[in-house]
Structure formats: C-alpha cells, structure tokens
Amino acid sequence: MQLDATCPVCSCAEVRLVASKCVREMWYRVYQCVNVECLHGFVWPLPEEAFLTAVYKDDPNLNSYMLSEESSKNVASFHEHLLDAYIDPRLPRRGRLLDVGSGIGTFVQVAKNRG
C-alpha cells in the first residue's frame, strides 16, 4: 500500500495498515513498515504538539477508561489484534518487546501472557 506515510526509521514508503482510531474527530492510523529488516510500527499522521497538549490538559488521566472491567477487556482484545496483525508468525514466540508509550502496560501484559 503506497501512502503519504513512510517509515520514520528506515524511510521505506511501503507500509501496511494495522489499526485506526478516531480521536477528537481526527483519524489516526497505526502502520507497520513492510521492510523485513525493520518492521517498525508507527502512528500516522503524527499528532501536532498543540493537539497533544490539549488532550492531556483536558484529561490528565488518559488511562481512566481502564477503570471498568469491560473497558479493560476491550483494550486487551485490541492488543491481541495488534499482536496477531503485527508480529510475523515466523518470528520466535519468545523474545524482547519494546513498547514505547505503554500507558499502563496492557500491551506488554498481553504479549507476556502469550509467551
């Protein structure tokens, strides 16, 4: 898939859509670089600094949605989807995972539970 989004790590122009989400009427998409030497995941478009400042100012506890059990299950389900869509099944099940901006660590916990 050719898009305006290019990998910020290796500059590869070929990326695939993994997930998308609307935040304050703006769609953000998670892409994965298809370069097998990279496979970096990134959000596109990058949010503007003013947007992030406003979001965090309005809700300093952005993880408050995790207070309900149903929300926790929904987030875990989304992270399961990301792992299924993102991680090449040919890669070893065990290894290292770097999660930058990990919120309260749900993604890492889901990955850990899977091995």
Image (cartoon, helix red, strand yellow):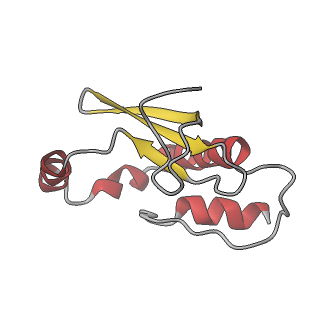
| Between 69 and 41, the one nearer to me in the picture | 41
Is residue 51 toward the left or the right of residue 8 in the image?
left
Rendered position, 53 above or below 45:
below
Residue drawn 59% across the image and 36% down it: 14
Percent position (x, y) of residue 5? Answer: 44, 36
Query: Residue 86's spot in the image, x, y percent?
Result: 67, 46
- From the image, which quarter does the N terminus lie in? top right
Q: How many marks?
A: 0
**Which quadrant does the C terminus fall into?**
bottom right
Q: Is residue 7 above or below residue 106?
A: above
Q: Is residue 50 left or right of residue 101?
A: left
Residue 99 location (% of width, % of height): 53, 65
Q: Which residue corresponds to the image point at 60% horizontal and 65% vertical from the top-left? A: 108
Q: In the depicted view, which residue is nearer to us: 73 or 35?
A: 35
Residue at the limit of the structure toward the bottom, as seen here: 96
Seen in the picture, residue 80 relative to 45 is either above or below; the reply is: below
Q: Can you give x and y, in whole percent of width and height, for residue 67 in the image? A: 40, 55
Q: Is residue 46 above or below residue 112?
A: above
Q: Quadrant of residue 77?
A: top right
Give the residue drawn at x 47%, y 41%. Answer: 6
- What residue is at 55 percent from the left and 44 percent from the top? 12
Front position in the image: 17 or 109: 17
Taking 40 as reference, is 111 left or right?
right
